[in-house]
Image (spheres, rainbow, N blue to C red):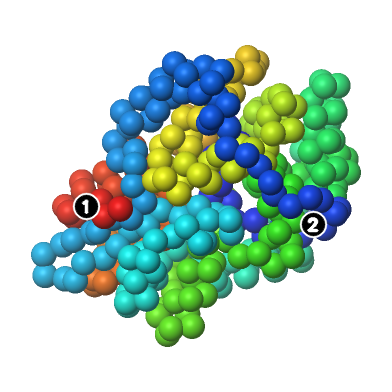
Amino acid sequence: MRRLFLWLIPVLFVAPPALAACIGQDMLPELRSDDPAGVDAMFARSHAIPNSQGLFWKIEKDGVPASHLFGTFHASEVVDDVPDPVWNALNSAKVAVFELSPGEQQAMNTRMVSDPSFTMDLDAPPLLSELTDGQRRTLAAALNARGMPVEAANQMRPWLLGSLLGFPACHLRAAATGAQVLDNVMAELAAEKGIRVAGLETYEEALSGFSDFDRDLLVKVLVADDTMLKREEDIFRTNALLYSAGETAAINELSIWLAERQNVSFDPRKVNQTLMNNLLDGRNRKWMTPLRRHLDLGNAFIGVGALHLPGEAGLIELLRAEGYKVTRLD
């Protein structure tokens, strides 16, 4: 379930302690050995989702040059896996469009430093009083690995807690020391080449999906089982490999299946759907207005998190419903 937070940009002002580098291992060989039928069923569910595979797509409309849509992975680890045709499309675009513009990211960074109410909700009941002893220990271990005391979570807003626990500690350490996620590498490259860089939403809009989400449930999802936190590097590595293979929908399906295997106290698929509705589908629909504006001028490069692409409410189907021809290239 934690992988739904891949879209969050890790602009976290934390100083994790010295940790080993990310050395996660692909979990799929182990899972296939342990439960081959389960793995096959997981991929079958994934492949039943519209546009479940593919990262790079051409968008066409009569009378204007073609544009391109690329599903990103909000991490630095996959930059070298991006194929040349994607970079070529970015380099030749008139405008490069990402979820947040560089200006919005900087505004968010500034507010995180200057406005305590942005990251903390002092009116919320203390989170730790809502957790069991086991959940508190799991949360404490996860936050300690990120250089934070567990008490810091007491009034932390859900979007920040989700972004802290949605990435392995080693990844956050890399981000804190300057590692650039793929989206930012692309945006900087475009700016260096004189290509206009734009965003699809404000940072407030990006975080609005958390506004109605129950904080206690979110925490229970994120710390449901300490086994998953202990293997967070392996999960991250597995998702990065699924991403590089173009298995976009499988990233989400694997998250659900792993939670189901742990016999958690909530319905993983139901909670996942709530998160999807809040963090992905609703934003996709809101993005259509700015997307049409860029696409109708032609030669745009659109780079958004890969989980925004598949599904009935994914960008590919929404664009087709608007009359655009969308063709998979990779």
Residue indicated by mark 1:
327
Whole-percent x, y for residue 281 in the image? 41, 41
Residue depicted at 29% across the width and 36% down the height: 50
Say which of marks 1 and 2 sits in front.
Answer: 1
Query: Which one is nearer the viewer's eye here, 80 or 144?
Result: 80
Residue depicted at 69% across the width and 60% down the height: 175
Amino acid type, mark 2: Val
Q: Residues within 10 Å of mark 2 (few under 14, many from 20)?
A: some
Amino acid type, mark 1: Thr
Q: Residues within 10 Å of mark 1 (few under 14, many from 20)?
A: some
Q: Is residue 254 above or below residue 210?
A: above
Residue depicted at 26% across the width and 65% down the height: 67
Whole-percent x, y for residue 90 in the image? 37, 71
Side (left or right) of 230 relative to 326: right
Query: Which one is nearer the viewer's eye here, 257 or 240?
Result: 240
Let me know if residue 48 appears in the view: yes
Side (left or right) of 254 relative to 302: right
Residue indicated by mark 2:
14
Residue depicted at 79% across the width and 50% down the height: 20
Query: Which one is nearer the viewer's eye here, 117 or 45?
Result: 45
Find numbered disc 1 in the image and state the secondary structure of the residue it sits on: strand
Whole-percent x, y for residue 182 in the image? 52, 61
